[in-house]
Image: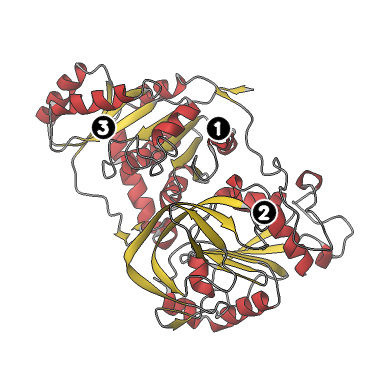
Amino acid sequence: MSTRLPRLVIAAPASGSGKTTVATGLMRAFADAGLAVSPHKVGPDYIDPGYHALATGRPGRNLDSFLCGPERIAPLFLHGAAGCDLAIVEGVMGLYDGAAGQGELASTAHVAKLLRAPVVLVVDASSQSRSVAALVHGFASWDPEVRVAGVILNKVGSDRHETLLREALDESGVTVLGAVRRAEPVHTPSRHLGLVPVAERRAEAVDAVAEFAARVREGCDLERLLALARSAPPVTGEAWSARGEPLPHPVPSPNRGSAPDPASQTPERPDEGADPNRGRPVIAVAGGPAFTFSYAEHAELLRAAGAEVVTFDPLRDEALPERTAGLVIGGGFPEVYAPELSANEPLRKAVAELAFAGAPVAAECAGLLYLSRALDGKPMCGVLPADARMSERLTLGYREAVAIADNPLAAAGTRVRGHEFHRTVVEPAAGAVPAWGITRPARRVEGFAQGGVHASYLHVHWAGAPGTAERFVAAAADAR
């Protein structure tokens, strides 16, 4: 199957060139013009997709060929962009930067090739003139399979500066599609892990996105950019479906054997006439300002597996959602909100009671910290025999791992690919039964697998780990 879908990849020679500003501004500018815009981000980043969602009114989605596999990039893209007029994909780091030691894998260039999408290179032109042509020529000619079809010049100082840059690029054969002037930085505060998420500053973020769009409209040729997007060839393949991949391992329950076929379920409502307490298991998913890291596909997978997904805010809600049978606590910034999380003692007790009762609990990174005894000295849920604290050291990178023992997410021996991104330390780093054995880049054990709890620093994209959601929902159904 081939799908005609206009699309652009917004890349840069290096981080800090302005691709987030330009990509988000383009998304908002085209959305304001009446187009349905599908936003995407290369790599595992959770924060930029929040700004993309604000710009477009659609979920920001990630395209990570390391976490999900190259074979799923086009299907995930088609799934996210269904019904849209235009898709814009923001790159990661420099155009050709990917997973360390693995060639082009997970780079923006790799994803652009998988999507057969034209690339627009955002260049920080603030300290150069004619040299920009050599830079662009190098990026455009490095890999003939990557179509660098245009340039947007960022941080241009004056009319004279723009003229010099355009004259130089005339010789490169790459079209200049925009020149964004140097200006006072838009207020987009950062901290230890990058931009402050939208959920923590929504009003200010709305203003920032509007300013990005204004700068793009003023400096870029939107008509030519749209024409370039429409020049992309059809995308070949079927759209990814949350119901589409089988469970690879049996659920660890003698009563079930394997998860029900998701395609046979109707996740929108319980079976007619059924006792409400015997309907779909409720999976509570932590949200709010402290827990902002989640891939859109996770909730879709849980629903497709037969769960009712209910979001709660650990900063404000004093109880778990009614009939909670399983709990998912993803990433975020609990270290920023440790006093407030600690002060919500009723919820901390409810989480501990659920975990100790044997219900499945999946905790990634921020969730790991929340389940610990204490975070920077502030009492947390006390589910894990560990304490967490801030650290000066940034831990960042892709990982390959194997499940040490059967748990609600994976059977023993299941291999996954994940990503770590934190400035905290948990001591001890692993429990009596670790969550994962990290096999690459360095061998070690990490996290906690005890009872129904699986807590780890490792972020895993469940679309790249088929069966994870089905297994978790089945465990929740058994635990009720």
Foreground pick, 322 / 453: 453
For the residue labelled by badge 2, is the local secondary structure a helix, a strand or a loop? helix
Mark identifier at residue 390: none
The crowd level at tag 2 (other Cα within 10 Å; few <14, some 14-19, many 20+) is many
- Measured in 3D between alpha carbons, the distance from the residue under mark 2 to the one under mark 1, in whole angstroms, is 21 Å
For the residue labelled by badge 3, is the local secondary structure a helix, a strand or a loop? helix
Amino acid type of the residue tagged 1 in the rendering:
Ala
Marks 2 and 3: which is nearer the front? 2
Foreground pick, 17 / 438: 438
In the rendered image of this protein, does residue 353 appear above or below residue 211? below
Q: Earlier in the sequence, mark 2 or mark 3?
A: 3
Q: Quadrant of residue 336?
A: bottom left
- Residue tagged 3: 219
Can residue 315 be seen at all in this image of the molecule?
no
- Circle 2/circle 3 CB separation < 8 Å: no
Mark identifier at residue 74: 1
Q: Residue at x 67, y 78 (%)?
A: 356
Q: Quadrant of residue 327?
A: bottom right
For the residue labelled by badge 1, is the local secondary structure a helix, a strand or a loop? helix
Q: Residue at x 41, y 62 (%)?
A: 200
Query: How many numbered discs sit on the rendered protein?
Result: 3
Q: Earlier in the sequence, mark 2 or mark 1?
A: 1
Amino acid type of the residue tagged 3 in the rendering:
Gly
Q: Earlier in the sequence, mark 1 or mark 3?
A: 1
Residue 283 image point, x, y percent: 67, 63
**Looking at the figure, which quarter contains the C terminus?**
bottom right
- Residue tagged 2: 469
